[in-house]
Each structure stands twice: as C-alpha cells, then as structure tokens.
Image (cartoon, rainbow, N blue to C red):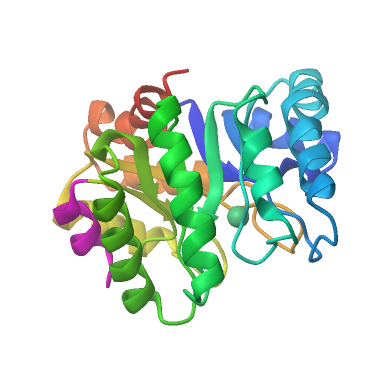
Amino acid sequence: MNVFDTHIHSEGRSVEDLERMANEGIRKAITCAFYPIEPKFPETLIDHFRKLATFEVERGRSAGMEIYPAIGIHPRCIPPKYEKVIESMGEIDCVAFGEIGLETANDLELDVLRTQLRLAKELDKPCIIHTPRRNKVEVTKKTIEILKDVGFPEDLAIIDHATGETVEMILNSGYHAGLTVQIGKLSVEDVYAIVSEHGFERFVLNSDTGFDRADMFATAKAVRFLEEKGFEKAEVEKLAEKNAVKFFKV
Ligand SMILES: [Zn+2]
C-alpha cells in the first residue's frame, strides 16, 4: 500500500534514506520547515524555505519520492523581524504552511501563529500545526482557540502530534488530527487504539523523521500493522494516503 508521510524534515536525511523510505512504499511526503538552531536573521528562514521548495523537491525526485514543501515559522525558531519572513511566504511555491504552532504559548508565539494563520486563510493554504510535548492538552486547547478566533477554515488545518488525550478535542473542533508514529510519540498500538475508537476520517499519518534519531519507516509499519489487525483496505488507505491527498490537494 502506498503511504503518504505528512510530516518529515527531509533535509536531515540522505538521498539513500529517502530511497529506502520510498522502497517501503512511502512514495509521498511533506517536508516541513524547521531550522535546528535559533536563526539570527529573517533571511536565514527565507533561504531555508527556498531550499525546501526547490532542492529538497529535486532530492526527493531522485530518490523516487514525491516531496511537497511546507514553509512557515516553527515556534522554536522565530527570528528577529519575523514579519519579514511572513511577508515572503506568499511568494514561495509550497503546498502548505508548516510546521507552525505553539511551543510554550508565550505572547510572541501567539502573534507569529496568528499572523501566519491570517495569511494562510487569505491564500487558502493548508496548515500543519505543531503541538508540544509539554503541556500538550493546555496548548492544544489554546491552539484551537486561536484557530476559531481567526475564523480559520476547518478543512485547512491539521493539528499535529495528537495523542489519546487530545484527539477527541481536535475532532470535536472540526479540524484534522495528525498522528505522529515515532519513538517518544505514538506507537503503532496507540494508532490502532485511536482509529479503533474514532475511525479513519480526518486523520493523517506522519513520522516527523528528520534530524534526530528516528524510525524513518514508522508510517509504513503503522499501515502494515492496521492491515494485519484486519481493518478494511479502503479504510486503512484513507489513513495511509487518501485523506492527505485530499487535504493537501496534491
Ligand atoms: Zn517536525
């Protein structure tokens, strides 16, 4: 079954790694913006976005993987004069904004998220919205509050790194939930438990594979696990690929 990994950081992986992922059936991926150190200049992120939109797409192609770029300011890498970065975001060819979102939910993060969401709404751009490990429930609540406040369309937001604790709140809000299968995040059993309870609609799957030690085949393994558990193929396909294709319009 083909798999769409909706959140990776391809820059952290070699072409050979991407090729191995493609060979496991992960033929499509969204590569998300994230700068591993705090950028000192807004231009650092602008060039980072340009790299994702061109170089990373090409690297994916040479590995047999269709890579779609997402750009945006992650809450852990907000540069000075961040407005300049957001001004550039409309000009760069990308399928989504991401990952954006809140980490500690301080005032600066709230401003940066709101401004990006307003632009995304204006441009009709899907958004991948990070939620943090710490204070997950509180920050997810705050994120939904901001989305509602901005009047952000339900079909345009994935609230990512959802857990058993936040999934219901996200689905009730009308937005999509991203399930991140990874060491320290969800296990394949967690994913199984979530879809057993909530079904397959409005979920997408990802591995957040990138710069850190990670299982780059995690999404393919989760899909295989669900197939083995006896779910209908058409249902599993929604989580594996179809929901994401529809959401990102690719
Ligand atoms: Zn990430």
Report x, y in % for residue 2.
49, 25
> Is residue 85 covered in magenta?
no
> Is residue 170 covered in magenta?
yes
Report x, y in % for residue 239.
34, 37
Does 101 sit left or right of 29 as displayed? Answer: left
* Residue 25 visible somewhere in the drawing: no
Which quadrant holds residue 86?
top right
171 in relation to 6, above or below: below
Does 66 sit left or right of 108 as displayed? Answer: right
Does 139 sit left or right of 235 as displayed? Answer: right
27 in relation to 10, above or below: above
Q: Residue at image x 83%, y 45%?
A: 43
State which quarter of the image contains the N terminus.
top left
Which quadrant holds residue 94?
top right
Q: In the rendered picture of this protein, how many numbered marks are placed on residues?
A: 0
Q: Residue at image x 66%, y 24%?
A: 91
Q: Quadrant of ligand 1?
A: bottom right
234 in relation to 100, above or below: above
Q: Nearer the viewer, residue 95 or 13?
A: 95
Q: Residue at image x 83%, y 38%?
A: 47
Report x, y in % for residue 192.
30, 56
53 in relation to 35, above or below: above
* Residue 77 visible somewhere in the drawing: yes
Report x, y in % for residue 40.
85, 62
Q: Return the residue found at the far bottom.
A: 135
Q: Residue at image x 43%, y 54%?
A: 160
What residue range appears in magenta? 163-174
Q: Nearer the viewer, residue 125 or 223?
A: 125
Does 48 sit left or right of 34 as displayed? Answer: right
Which quadrant holds residue 183?
bottom right
